[in-house]
Image: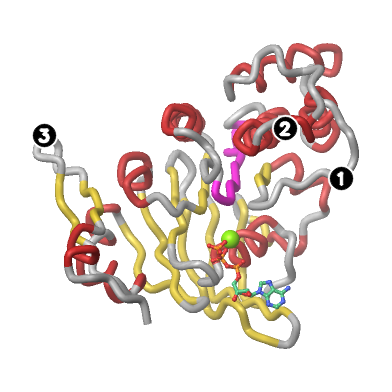
Amino acid sequence: MIEVSGVSVRLSGKTIVSQVGFTAPAGQLTAIAGPNGSGKTTTMKAVSGELPYAGSVLLNGQEVNALQPWQLATMRGVLPQANTISFPFTVREVVRMGLTTGVNRNPGKAEQTAAKALAAVDLGGFEGRFYQELSGGEQQRVQLARVLCQIAEPIVDGKPCWLLLDEPVSSLDISHQLTIMTLARKFCEAGGGVIAVMHDLNLTALFADQIILMKSGQVAASGSVRDVLTDRTMESVFGCALRINQIPADGTPFVLAHSAVQSGYNPA
Ligand SMILES: Nc1ncnc2c1ncn2[C@@H]1O[C@H](COP(=O)(O)OP(=O)(O)OP(=O)(O)O)[C@@H](O)[C@H]1O
Ligand SMILES: [Mg+2]
């Protein structure tokens, strides 16, 4: 379980997130959504141990800011929002970086582990390509393969492992969005945990167990998809009229900007 309570982060003398709290259980996909600049990435960086914070972040019961980097590396993999690499690494080299930071349970099988991770993100055969020469979506999937090399198992020594993914599908086509979200779900079903920052609310409705909705550095709403995706909450958080409908077969909510467009959307 990841338990975030009363977390605040200050950067450049400003409070960026304030008193954020939520619980992400293992076995579940927790989505963090909200407008640009609302503090999603900053919150993720506090949870992953990349930024100092006030308050408490318990990762499987241990305070994140008291753990060493090598300990964190065995417990959680991080997909950052930005994936720039300045040197001409090959795909194989980028993916194998994950093996050097995480728990490599099969040191003699580095090549197979990397190949398995690349196949999982539908990049089999890309090993020898240069990272810089890939498309944006391909680069994003290489980075995810790196994370999957680091955190190859959902459970290690009886404890859940975590994938912390900041906009994992932002550059992907619809088919690969489904591939990656399904992979995240299977990781949860096998006992691991996932926290993913998401902008696509419809994909979130299909795959997330709970949504943490942020606004202005705070949690504006949290709970199940059906509790959080409401007309009133959407309008107050995003500042535009959005219509929530439900798929008749199973009641899954989906969000349309139809009403905003019809009323001649005119952002303030
Ligand atoms: N190092 C920093 N110094 C000062 N302000 C920062 C710093 N990093 C982020 N911010 C500000 O903090 C706010 C939250 O940023 P954050 O990256 O967490 O937003 P976000 O919710 O992830 O947005 P997006 O959807 O655009 O990725 C923004 O207003 C941003 O300008
Ligand atoms: Mg962000």
Label 2, on which residue?
A: 146
Residue toward you, 115 or 52? 115
Residue toward you, 258 or 179? 258
Confirm or reject: label 1 Cβ below 8 Å from ligand 1: no
Rendered-image quadrant of the C terminus: bottom left
Q: Which residue is drawn at 51% across and 53% down?
A: 197
Label 1, on which residue?
A: 86
Disc 1, SS: loop
Q: What stretch is highlighted in magenta?
A: 155-167
Which of pointers 1 and 2 indicates the residue nearer the eye?
A: 1
Amino acid identity at mark 2: Arg
Residue toward you, 226 or 244? 244
Q: Which residue is drawn at 23% across and 49% down?
A: 254
Amino acid identity at mark 3: Ala
The reply, left or right, for residue 194 in relation to residue 235 is right
Label 3, on which residue?
A: 249
Which numbered disc flags the more N-terminal residue, 1 or 3? 1
Q: In this view, does 46 lie above or below 253?
A: below
